[in-house]
Image: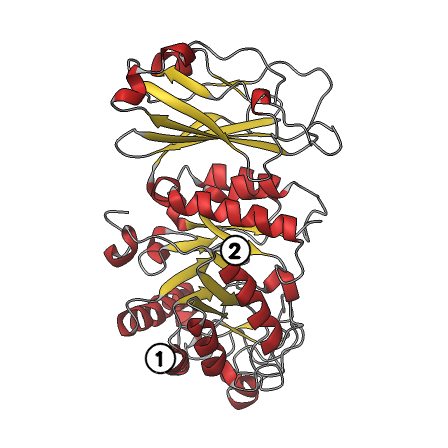
Amino acid sequence: MRHVVNQRFARRDRPVLVNNWEATYFDFDEGRILDIASRAKDIGAELVVLDDGWFGHRDDDTTSLGDWDADRRKLPGGIVSLSSRIHDMGLEFGLWFEPEMINMDSDLHRTHLEWMVGPLNRGLTPQRNQYVLDMARPEVVDHLAIRMSRLISAAHIDYIKWDMNRNITEAYSAALDDGRQGEFFHRYIMGVYALYDRLTHEHPDVLFESCASGGGRFDLGMMYYAPQAWLSDDTDAVERALIQYATSYGYPQSTMGAHVSAVPNHETGRVTPLSTRGDVAFFGDLGYELDISTTSAQDLSEMRRQISFYVSHRDVFQRGVLTRLVSPYEGDGNLMAWQVASHDGNTVIVECLRILSRPNPPTCRIRPRGLDCEALYAVSLFDSAAKLADPGADSSSGTYYGDELMNLGILMPQAVDPASGRRDGDFTSRLVLIERCHGDAAQDSDSDSGPALESPSL
């Protein structure tokens, strides 16, 4: 973060966002987006992102990539009007682009057939009904820079989600002779960098998010321009825990877009608790990608608690020291745990995720690291669903010395739904807040400083 990412964003908080994609897909209009924005404001989100489907006549993925003019059927006032209304709510506004792609059914293709990657006299391979623009051509870069910059300025856009939803096939540029086709990939990515460079210099306060989902693009070169990336369209919480855990070996949390999405999940069909989806997304740049305009009052209340907790500890989550405690890639892979700590060591947040529930499981102890052995720490369980109605059910909470926590560990309690009496099932997460005590609070806590009692496992 000190050497690669644009220093304007290296220490800047990433906003909590709501994205409409899994809420609406292509089926939306201005009223529906404004309804989502109103709910987003109510739960404490800070940024609303309009995803794919806002341009041309794009009602599905077969058309309009390359035509970056608002669809007036859906948005009568265009992007400028929508952005203004969302800004008036006190929210930031973000917009989806896939500038490197083109559909056959687009004005851009009909005007500039030669701008498409691949030999024109052969069949080309579509993916997601789209093809690739030849970024090796300076005129393509110029065209995109002018169109995108004009809209960013007019609508005062705060955030760009820059997707790349396919890899490159038939790597060929009609602008290069046959003896120079080996230069294509280098020239292509230099063209992408040139476009990013122009846009980030013209709009230095816009947060750009790149995409690692379709084209597999997530590298340090891209981080220079886009300080965060969308890791995968697989938003299932269990899958995302594995993805984010592995990604953390190369990239810090602030570079990982992480969303709470709808269930059943659109990729896996899995149903996971909202609390688990939130806990996993905390270890990245938190966002929500589900239809909050139709979400129950109970779930909205839980989201509000999640956002409040995340924002109050955002510096720790996004820029804290990450330590992996239990790897999901080792043993039977049923347990994962990690922690983030403030740089002064005064705040540590531990997440433990159990994937499958098992009968009569062993006691689950998680041992945090990096604490001061002789310091006292207040330990509390954060449960966004507020299911632990009986405080006595949480025997992990209390005040303990650092050496106790690191050696004896923290017992992960099992929650009980007060209405049904049912205990946790599959895909259960626990989030534990550990805060260093100071002054009188540390001196007066001798009665709570013993080790945690046995309790039901996670």
Q: In the picture, which quadrant includes the C terminus?
A: top right
Q: What element carries label 2?
A: helix
Q: In this view, does 9 lie to the left or right of 114?
A: left
Q: Position of residue 314 (x, y in %)?
A: 38, 45
Q: In which quarter of the image is residue 177?
A: bottom left
- Foreground: disc 1 or disc 2: 2
Q: In this view, does 29 lie to the left or right of 360?
A: left
Amino acid type assigned to the residue bearing label 2 in the image:
Ile
Please provide percent x and percent y for residue 410.
48, 18
Q: Earlier in the sequence, mark 1 or mark 2?
A: 2
Residue nearer the viewer, 244 or 190: 244
In the figure, 397 relative to 22: above or below?
Answer: above
Identify the coloring.
secondary structure
* Residue depicted at x 38% and y 41%: 313
268 vs 136: above or below: above
Which x, y percent locates residue 416?
67, 28
User: How many numbered marks does the figure carry?
Assistant: 2
Query: Which is nearer the eye, 186 or 59?
Result: 59
What is the spatial separation of the Cα atoms under label 1 and label 2, in whole angstroms? 28 Å
**Residue displayed at 38% across by 48% down:** 254
The residue beneath circle 1 is 153
When the figure is inspected, residue 222 is found, relative to residue 159, above or below; the finding is: above
- Amino acid type for the residue under numbered disc 1: Ser
Report the residue at 62% width, 85% height from top: 73
Q: Which residue is rendered at x = 52% and y = 50% of the image?
A: 304
Mark 1–mark 2 CB contact (< 8 Å): no
The disc placed on residue 61 is: none
Residue 167 location in percent, x, y? 54, 61
**Residue 31 in view:** yes
Where residue 252 sits, quadrant-wise, is top left
Residue behind mark 2: 43
Q: What element carries label 1?
A: helix
